[in-house]
Image: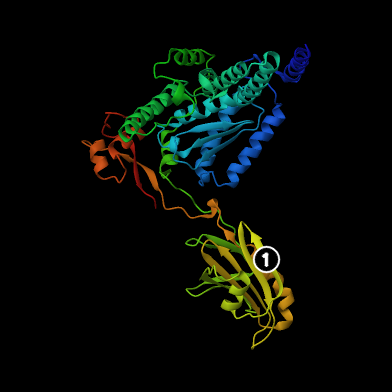
Amino acid sequence: MLLRSHAIALAAAISAGLMLPGCASNPATGGIDIVLMSESKEISIGREMHEKMMESGAAYPDQRVQAYVDRIGQALAAHSDRPKLKYTFTVIDSENINAFALPGGYIYINRGLMSYLDNEAELAAVLSHEIGHVTARHSVRQQTASQVSSILAQLAYVTTGSADLADASNMAGTAIVRGYGREHELEADSEGAVYLYNTGYDPNALLAVIGVLKDQEQYNRIKAKESGKKSQSYHGLFATHPRNDSRLQQVIRTASELEERPPTLIEPAEFRGIINGLAYGKSSKTAVREDDRFYHNKLNFTFAHPEDWTVDSGSGAIVSHPADGSSTVNLTIKRKDDKLSARDFIGQQLQAPKLFEPATLNQAKLTGYTGIAPPGDGKNSRRLAVIYYGRIAYLFEGEVTEEANFAAEDAKFMALIESFRPMEKKEREGAKPQELAYIQTTPGMTYASLARQSKLRDAENQLRLMNGHYPRGEPHAGDWVKIVKQGS
């Protein structure tokens, strides 16, 4: 009885915790959802995740492309069920064929998916589908379902003492929340189709996008079977809809029967102009770097220097100095000697038998040692340091031309030394990527003939995929088709 009384109390607490603060009208569907997250919390989570993505250099570094996608996305969002929400649309610098939404109005499309779209309406269809996930609060509902299933599992164990029943509850919850699932994806399609129509786009563009993605699915399945690997798929439309999905076609028809709206004027040349030059393949990284830092691409390190200093990189040393030459920091590179302590290594390499103010260095997961060598042998005081990075020892030697200036300059020496670290991913230069280009076909031109001039792997199939002619279609004379060329 004691166990059961605790169970009843727990059930009451759970019910109170779930129902009282958590019932909300869904802005897209109009139904009542049980949610455990406020809209402000939803926005806060999305903002935090977005900022982390942007700090990592995830955005495609072409403001012209970003502005185009944002303009289309904002027009769709203005005709959505949550028009007052602040939306952020971002093109992600990834070759993967995907698009996704974070809580609170943060929507993303990979440049890899854009490569395979044929026109602006198809791009709008992808964005409207993701807006549908946001307006229907799918991420919030998913998180709530996950929490509820966990609570129900605990309740099942407390009330029955059965671990098997608790496991079954968790399994049911997992089945509900893995991915968005069929119902949520169809709901996003339904909302997205309406937003397309309201903005002046043809809702049938959703079906065209599914065709693009299903071509990719078919191609990937064939290639995966040949290589013995698992096929990859797009998270939403790609995974849940067949081409002839009757429910989706009904969604499209329903949207098309809404009150008449003036069509959006689409200039095909504008979409081609945006896609022309879009990076294709692995890397389009343009390094994101600060002005007052030195970057060594080959050895993958960087350090900051005073704003008015210059850094000269030679074969023997990297020398940092102000314009008047009143002080310098020499950085030399040696192989690490495991037989010597860091202190002895400095002494041997930089002729410094004595060091004042010694200190160990721990920065950016690197270790080292530093100290001041007193004047002697015709030299003024010197700030010396060694930092170990892998199997390499980086030796710093800060000097002044006038001994009286050492104390003031030493603060700059130390700031430079302590700023030494490995380069971050966003700071590294990527290889020049290939890029998309449009050409107008001439009579007799085929994908086989275009493939013979291409360096793409499996070029004929890839060209068909990116032009909507997979698996056996051919272009007609005068068609604009995408090809891939080496980046300029």
Q: Nearer the viewer, residue 319 or 9?
A: 9
Q: Position of residue 209 (x, y in %)?
A: 43, 26
Residue 158: x and y in percent read 70, 17
How many numbered tags mark residues here? 1
Looking at the picture, tell me which residue is in the foreground, 4 or 233.
4
Q: Which color scheme is applied?
A: rainbow
Is residue 476 shown above or below 407? above
Q: Is residue 442 left or right of residue 72?
A: left
Kindly indicate the quadrant of the structure image that contains residue 107. top right
Q: What residue is at 63 percent from the left and 72 percent from the top?
A: 343
Q: Residue furthest left?
A: 444
Please name the amino acid that badge 1 sits on: Thr
Residue 224 vs residue 99: left or right?
A: left
From the viewer's perspective, is 52 left or right of 240? Answer: right
| Residue 213 locus on image (x, y percent) | 41, 28
Residue 34 seen in the current view = no
The residue pinned by badge 1 equals 360
Corner quadrant of residue 418: bottom right
Which residue is located at x 67 percent, y 28 percent? 84
- Quadrant containing the N terminus in the rendered view: top right
The answer to whether residue 379 shows anywhere in this view is: yes
Q: Please identify the residue farthest to the bottom as the structure is shown.
A: 378
Q: Nearer the viewer, residue 230 or 190?
A: 230
Up/down of 348 relative to 16, above or below:
below
Outermost residue, top direction?
1
Q: Position of residue 398 (x, y in %)?
A: 64, 75
Give the image quarter of residue 440.
top left
- Comparing 332 with 101, the one in front is 332
Q: Residues within 10 Å of mark 1 (few under 14, many from 20)?
A: some
Is label 1 in a helix, a strand or a loop? strand
